[in-house]
Amino acid sequence: LVARKSYNTPLVGFFARVLAAVPVTRPQDIAFKGSGRLLRLDKDDGDAFRLAGSEACRFDVEFTDGAKLRYTDGASGRAWVWRVRAVESHCMALLSLDPALVDPPADPQASLPRQGSYTVLPRGDYEEAFAEARATLQRGGAICLFPEGGSHDQPDLLELKPGVALIALGVSRPVPIVPIGLSYFRGHSIGAKVTVHIGPPIHVSEDERASHAAGGEERREATAALLGRIKKALRAVMVPAASIDELRLIHSTRRLWCSSRGLGRRDLRPAVRQDLDRRFAFAIRRVLGEADLPLEHLSRLSSRTDLAALEEAPSPPGGEAVSARRREVATMVARLRRYNRQLQDLGLRESQVQQLEVAPFFSTLFSLGHMVTALLLASLPSLALNLPVGVAAVAWARWRQQAALRGSKVKLTASDVVLSEKIKFSLVAVPLLWLSYATLLLLATPLSRSDVLTLLMVAPIASFLGVISVESGMIALRDLRPMLARLVYDRRRVDALKAEQRALQRFVRTEMDRLVSSDPEVKELYEMRGEVGAADWERLQRSSGSGGERCPT
């Protein structure tokens, strides 16, 4: 399935048609700016809100069946999405809050945008796409879809759209639903690593299919039940994290634990790293829960001032004064964040810290110069054939990234669109660059047309070899980053960084040993051989009594 907005574009649409993709018209693809201005929003009976607009509004025309209204809070900048329950006149309507948003605004009137502008989201046209998808499945084919309804860069699942359940329930033959998790950090960078984790299939039961065929409330219950099973299966193939700060904490803890045992990144397969991340996510939740340290405080723990503010903050409901345990964990999390920032600034990996040594300045500088010269010579084809397009593609992708960020209410940095935009730009710009070179050679050199044509045919091969050489060079440069650090770090700073790593490794090992000895679920998880399956995650969650959506299942 592909958004019709993308399907109708030249490049993506071409590849979508080659893959026989099914276009889906989503509300955001056909959204439009509403007429007039919003003036008042007041609480009405039950969960309804009464909206009043200016005389220029055309609610009776714009708010069709199933439409939604979206605007940005004039005070906080939060995006609000409302369902249109009834239209009373061209400037009066009854609204209810979209189920995806939990809490209504405390002051409805204050939530209205300052300029009164709003966006209308008409109901998407799904019937034709769903019918084609069901027909494909009925023939024994396969359909690939992203059930969240769009791309994003959140570390956790968005609310699933019911389409995946409606499609599966509408097929009479048995259809397995296979959950797939994609895990990566820098998906917007060429050459970034990604782990594809495939879980066990889900099957639609006969009871669910019969309830769906009955219609009415039974159909809604069957759809919700199947969607819940799909959501649980998807969580079993991803690393659970409520925020990007928690995800970084999980990755950092795993790297410290591995490096303390002499295991580097290259010693572990991506699937093994992901499995370890899920186990550490489970353990970290236990540690933070024992310390009464809310997840939302992780992003603040980076300095002594933040720690002092945390200590003075009121305890959670039912809690006592901030304990020594809470301060100990908060201090270590803050130190871990500062340590990771140091590594990031230096371009070092966890396994490279203990290799860092203070070397003679001139010999280090000579080694760096030698490596950079070799890299430049190997990259000459890429500099001529790819660099101009690469620079322009980066600028284009950043502009498109900002546009996507302004138009979305779920993207954090809109990094999910960056690489797509680079590829689309390059598909057009690279051939144009080669043709420009060929034209210049014909006009400004004595080369014949056959010679220029031969060079033009060789250009793709040279360009590809240039990309390979640059990629290999970048990997080599990452290994040489400790050498760069030697130029700016003296003995005292090097020793301090190594000592900090050892202290954090001891803390991680101590916490893991304590949890393994005191917590049966963590002990079972720690000692479990092989990859932890979905059934084991679900059993551990039930036995721990957590039941929260943010747990590994």
Image: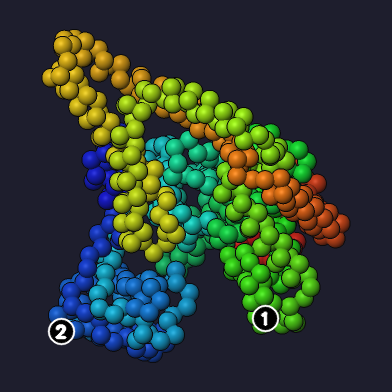
Which residue is at the front of the view, 73 or 278?
73
Residue 309 placed where, x, y %? Answer: 64, 77
Tag 2: amino acid: Glu
Say whether residue 406 is visible: yes
Q: Is residue 62 left or right of residue 480?
A: left
- Residue 129, can we see it? no
Q: How many marks?
A: 2
- Residue identified by numbered label 2: 55
> How many other residues sit within 10 Å of disc 2, few (<14), some (14-19) or many (≥20)?
few
| In the depicted structure, whether residue 328 falls above or below residue 104 | above
Where residue 103 appears, as percent x and y from the top left, is 47, 78
| Between 194 and 198, the one nearer to me in the picture | 194
Tell me where residue 241 sits by quadrant.
Answer: bottom right
Classify mark 1: helix, strand or loop: helix
Q: Residue 292 appears at what percent x and percent y? A: 71, 72
Looking at the image, which residue is at 16% across and 22% down?
439
Left or right of 531? Residue 404 is left
Q: Which residue is mark 1?
A: 312
Q: Are marks 1 and 2 in contact (CB under 8 Å)?
A: no
Residue at the (24%, 25%) spot, across then down: 434
- Neighbour tally class for label 1: few under 14, some 14-19, many 20 plus, Cα within 10 Å: few
* Farthest residue, direction left: 443
Q: Secondary structure at mark 2?
A: loop
Q: Label for residue 343?
A: none
